[in-house]
Image: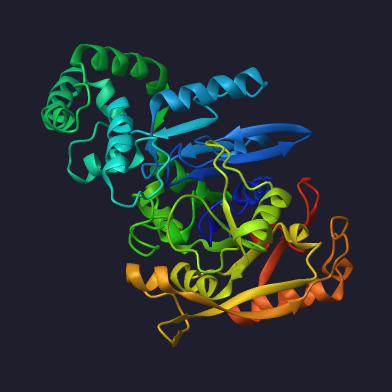
Amino acid sequence: MSQLIVVGAQWGDEGKGRIVDWASEDAELVVRYNGGHNAGHTLVVDGRTWKLALLPCGLLHGRTGAIGKGVSLDPQALLDEISRVSAQGLHITPDTLWLAEDINLVLPLHRALDVAQESLRGTPVGTTGRGIGPALEDRSGRRALRLCDLAEPDTLEERLDGLLAWHAPLARALGLPAPERAALLAQLQAWGEALLPFAAPVGERLAAAHTRGAHILYEGAQAMMLDTDHGTWPYVTGASTLPAQAAPGSGFGAAARARVLGVVKAYSSRVGNGPFPSEMHGAAGDALRERGGEYGVNTGRPRRCGWIDLALLRQTARLGALDALAVTKLDVLDDQPEISVCTGYRIGGRLHESLPPGIAAQAAAEPVYETLPGWQCDTGRSRRLEDLPMQARKYLERIEAFVGVPIALVSVGAEREALIAPQGAFDL
């Protein structure tokens, strides 16, 4: 097996960056295929902390990174991130980073529109305000600007005029300043100078690497229950977050044959609004948040926390055709005398084995719990499954049995070596 997709199996923030960081050691290429700078990772490598939003994690280990067409690219956000990591000693060049030539751009007008749209919703979705949703709307409406447009001056001006013809009246209707053509054109030209050297036929290069047997790692952003079609709609992101998106998002169809590692926290968390049946409220939820350090990497927003939702995880395992699970932050539960796991939902007196799609039904869902004994001892030094206390092993076994997917990896601490990983990443 020479291809692996790492994807979030809950609502995001499962610690995917940590798992991608581990798997990068065995990879030659690491590819971002979805999301944008509205999702990020905090990584500790050799005692140094790195905060990444767009750059593939493998760059930290000298691997080649690629950002595929499926990513929504804010040019300034990428340039700022490159500047930050360069100041830390990681130099990014066109040899180490490939940008899909036809990647779609997130512009300042998209950010303004994102904030305005969120304020108009009766119940806010909880977006980051980074402009990703409106940029995706322009992509679907065939109005978007792409990186390759910046290389063609006449095309750029024509495409920009068409974009502004749509956005100017929309801005007026929302009480926003009209986008200034001259300033935006100058900004686009400056971005072109800085980023066009990184433009590459990513799909072709991945195909060539695959042919010679290179290990390719696909780094998913966000998580499957935020998928625009199959997540807890409308409290979702604007594009697909499924592992199947790795093929169109990278431009390499054979990514559809990659094995899939789903990352799940030993508990659950969610940022923003939307259904969360197993959420813990009050002091218990606050304590779990503090113990797990559950605050957004890029936004600092506190995450809602709760017990693991096995019914939801079984849904995402089916949806994403997961081959294996990585369970992160098991150590955060070390102090719990008892641990609850959600196995279904009661809605209007009726038992449901999976979360239904209706908005009102999801909001009314009451969790059905099993209670398991906690272990109340330190798991942070465990490096083999046999090192874990019996109750922790039984907890993991219950997850496997209910979801029907084997657990291939467990993390028990923030340190890079605090992993129970009996196999190499590409041997899953």
Q: Residue at x 79, y 74 (%)?
A: 393
Residue 215 image offset from top left, x and y in percent: 59, 51
418 is higher (above) or lower (below) than 400: above
Residue 131 vertical placement versus 375 (above, below):
above
* In this picture, residue 345 sits left or right of residue 186: right
Residue placed most toward the observer, 223 or 321: 223
Residue pictured at 45% horizontal, 61% vertical:
225
Residue lying at the far bottom in this picture: please name it.
350
Q: Quadrant of the C terminus?
A: bottom right
Q: Residue at x 88, y 56 (%)?
A: 381
Who is closer to the viewer here, 81 or 121?
121
Front residue of this view, candidates 50 and 324: 50
The reply to whether residue 212 is in sight is no
Relative depth, front residue between 321 and 414:
414
Marker count (numbered): 0
- Image coordinates of residue 155 in percent, x first then y, are 17, 24
Looking at the picture, how far across and down is residue 377, in whole percent? 88, 64
- In this rendering, the answer to whether 124 lies above or below 165 is below
Please name the colour scheme applied to the rendered image.
rainbow
Q: Is residue 135 left or right of residue 214?
A: left
The percent coordinates of residue 188 (x first, y second) are 30, 19
Q: On the rendered structure, is 319 left or right of 398? A: left
Q: Quadrant of residue 337?
A: bottom right
Note whether residue 55 is visible. Answer: yes
Q: Quadrant of residue 132?
A: top left
Q: Is residue 36 above or below residue 92?
A: below
Location of the N terminus by quadrant is: bottom right
